[in-house]
Amino acid sequence: MATDMSRRRLLALGAGTAGAAAAGSLLPASLHEALAAGPPPGGPAAIRHVVVLMQENRSFDHYFGMLRGVRGFGDRNAIELPSGTSVFEQPDGPTRTVLPFPVRDAAEAQRKDLQYIGDLDHSWDGGHSAWGDGWSDNWVTAKTAATMAYYDRQDLPLHYELADTFTVCDAYYSSVHTSTSPNRNHLVSGWTGYEANGDRAVGNDAYEEGTHPGYDWTTYPERLEKAGRSWKTYQEWENFTDNNLEFYASFKAVARKALAKAGDYAYMEAFYADVRKASGAERQRLLGLLDEGVAGLAPAERSLFERGLRRGETGGLARSFRADVAAGKLPEVSYVVPPAVESEHPGASSPAASAALIHQLLDALGSHPEVWRHTAVFITYDENDGFFDHVPPPVPPADDADENWAGRPTGLGIRVPMLVVSPWTVGGYVCSEVFDHTSVIRFLESRLGVEEPNITPWRRTVTGDLTSAFDFRRPRSLPEQPEPAPVPPFTGRWRPVPPAEQRMPEQEPGTRRARPLPYQPDAQGRFDGSDGSALRVTLSNTGRSAAHFTLYPYAGEFEVPQHKDVAGTAGWRVPVTGDAYRFTITGPNGFRREFAGAGAPGPEVRSRIDPRNHDLHLTLDNRGERTATYTVRPVGYVEEADVADRTREVVVKAGRSRTVVHSAADAHGWYDLEIAVAEDEVFHRRLMGHIEDGRESVSG
């Protein structure tokens, strides 16, 4: 029945968008008309409705690694594995590697349907195994080779059009290295605490609803309720157990009271499972007994039930949402919880089924332009399933008890897609500020003034509140869209196998508009003392938000990658464990510094960023005993014909220094430079990143 329902809805989608598709768009015609009016005046205060659609189990690379102008398969800042290969070359045993490969090609080779690939391991242990202490080098072993399969524009036409029309976030991470429930805990309450037995809630234990006592901390919807703010959960009789409010003790207590007349039900899913199985008079009897129980609740309890626990009939989610929009009853905060068939979960759904639901929701809003003009829609994913993503996430200090469990960091988890759909996010932008699921709550905090104390200080330090994805100052017009490909029909479940002959995918060429970011990172090293036993690395960040830095120690300087969050200045003392050092430091939005050299004082490089003029000032220090000849060469963001003219050769006598200036103005603030010394073949520096000036830019 679920498959038939999905097929009917897809056919309805196709029939309803025939005219739009002919014009090169899969967006509802109603939304195109509503967008023509532009955003209303009033800035952030004009947002009256926030709609949160959290789907299931897709990583960023899995969906958008091929998308133009985001940090995908063409990432210049992709890390190197300890083996010396790229992070995109994931080990599969001692001699073989697996590259990202198209689902479409695998589907043709295996005679399967590309929309219906199966799910992979997405457990706490499996997630940490793939993460590999920060090296991100164990994906295939932990997840199977299918982890490297990806979709592209042809496979996900609506998703790509949403990214090209509105704003996509390419530094949005899941909250935990694990499965659905703990990540959804972060969405509805700001964190995941502890089970009754004292273990951290990092698994799906709450799904044992008959025995699970319920989580004892407060949810954000309860805080909205107390503050008199309107909110509602839109869901059907079958909700794939994705409404995590049902797993909290406060809501469980309300559910038990509401179900008392219906029978011996300990939780909502057991009751609605019987409703789904029943028909006719028996179904009506069960629903009637529930209504009697709800009527007997105290007003405060009844409000929690109706807003958080009430489920609608099968196939009615979008219809219920549309009815509230039409009646002017859309609440300030809407949580949309689809049934399994529309959840996008690779074990139960498909991108096409989710696209059908998204289309209906956007059409409901577009059909009422005054509601749309005051609405922001967030479309994201609870976790990555087991699908590969090449950007290792920020992780907390090891001594942060709130953000570590059993010797492992709880998060951030793997990158997942986030699409921000609203009148203020039009233009095909990318936003590269670091976010996670708690950022959705923080956006609501900024809009509604209702605070969530469960969010830990570290998460507030390292992640933003999603306001940077919006531009409330000036509207943008709709970009032109390519003709989308048709969605193929459903056939069955399967796992992709990589081809015998592999090649690295080529990401779509071009850039996209980029939102300004609150970071301005820099890093430089200087020998600590005269014996060459360590480098003192200084990290700086003059932006208004903390920047997360990761140090990858390729010459054994540390056992595992190191992490620091910096607002102002901080640093590492990096030991030189042998005759030479080699390590790389990465940061937000493509920031990179590579360090290599001999274990003795000699050539050094200091940098200073001039945001006003988009200049990078490089001071070449010679702390050695002989003259050094530096070569400063651009390796990116410069036309090939101009590389020779932009390359500098600078002679610096022993004990002296000289400064050169590299202008990044013509490259919209982007730079990528290599520095070598003729007399020291081991010495190497690479400086890469973006100079922020507080204004929008383009992606690198």
Image: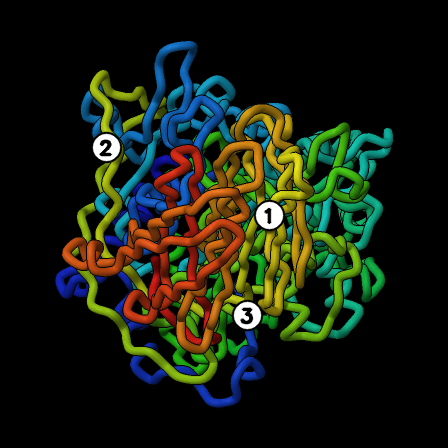
CA gap between label 3 and label 2 equals 36 Å
Q: Which corner quadrant of the image does residue 453 belong to? A: bottom right
Query: How packed is label 1: few (under 14 Cα within 10 Å), some, or many (20 or more)?
Result: many
> Which of the 4 image quadrants contains residue 446?
bottom right
- Looking at the rendered structure, the secondary structure element under dot 3 is helix
Residues 273 and 86: in front is: 86
How much space separates mark 1 and mark 3, taking CA atoms?
A: 38 Å
Label 2 sits on residue: 104
Going by the image, does 478 lie left or right of 97? left
Q: Residue 526 has which mark?
A: 1
User: Is residue 695 depicted above or below 301 in this figure?
Assistant: below
**Crowding at label 3, few (<14), some or many (≥20) Cα neighbours within 10 Å?**
some
Question: Can the viewer see residue 353 in this picture?
Answer: no
Give the residue number, with chain letter if any, for mark 3.
467
Identify the residue at horizontal 48%, vertical 75% (top origin). Answer: 694
Front-most of residues 391 and 127: 391
Q: Which quarter of the figure is the N terminus placed in?
A: top left
Residue at (29, 30) in percent of width and height: 101
Percent from the top left, x then y, of residue 546? Answer: 63, 60
Residue type, label 1: Arg
